[in-house]
Amino acid sequence: MQERGCWGSSVAEHRLLGSEALGAEELSEMNKDAQLRATINQKLIETGERERLKELLRAKLTECGWKDQLKAHCKDVIREKGLEHVTVDDLVAEITPKGRALVPDSVKKELLQRIRTFLSQHASL
């Protein structure tokens, strides 16, 4: 479901067309950033590095107890609201912020370093 902002517009639309409309230069920069992200993502996929990073992340999150903490939080939310009153979408919306906050900084730093190393080895991007 798309997040909605003022007057029923999507938040993304509001950001682009909000009170201070972006100029052509800003839109061009945003487009370049999106293209660069897509190129990097494609290279990560082609080389298999994306899957390796995902596996590393899974292992690190399991190792630090993140999965168990999030599972316990899910159970708490379901207990609080009642099983018949919670949809999967509700549960995802409820636990996502906590899930992100619970990722240890050391895990984030390690993944970021791996990505930086990958980018330096594939500098032609």
Image (cartoon, grey):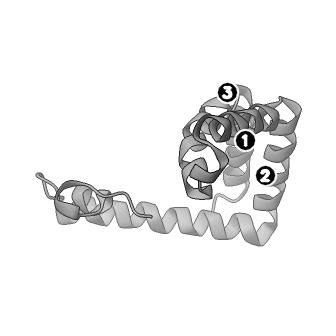
Work out which quarter of the rendered image holds the C terminus and state it. Answer: bottom right
**In percent of the image, x 78 and y 53: which residue is there?**
54
Q: Nearer the viewer, mark 3 or mark 1?
A: 3
* Whole-percent x, y for residue 76 in the image: 68, 33
Please name the residue that numbered disc 3 is placed on: 105
Q: CA distance from mark 3 to mark 1?
A: 10 Å
Identify residue type, mark 2. Leu
Categorize mark 3 by other alpha carbons within 10 Å: few (<14), some (14-19), many (20+): few
Work out which quarter of the rendered image holds the N terminus and state it. Answer: bottom left
Q: Point out the tag, 3 or 1, that comes first from the N-terminus.
A: 3
Q: Secondary structure at mark 2?
A: helix
Please name the residue that numbered disc 1 is placed on: 111
Q: Point out the tag, 1 or 2, that comes first from the N-terminus.
A: 2
Q: CA distance from mark 2 to mark 3?
A: 16 Å
Occupied quadrant, residue 70: top right
The answer to which of 17 and 102 lies nearer the viewer is 102
Q: Secondary structure at mark 1?
A: helix
* Disc number placed over residue 53 in the picture, else none: 2
Occupied quadrant, residue 31: bottom left
**In percent of the image, x 73 and y 54: which residue is there?**
121
Categorize mark 2 by other alpha carbons within 10 Å: few (<14), some (14-19), many (20+): some
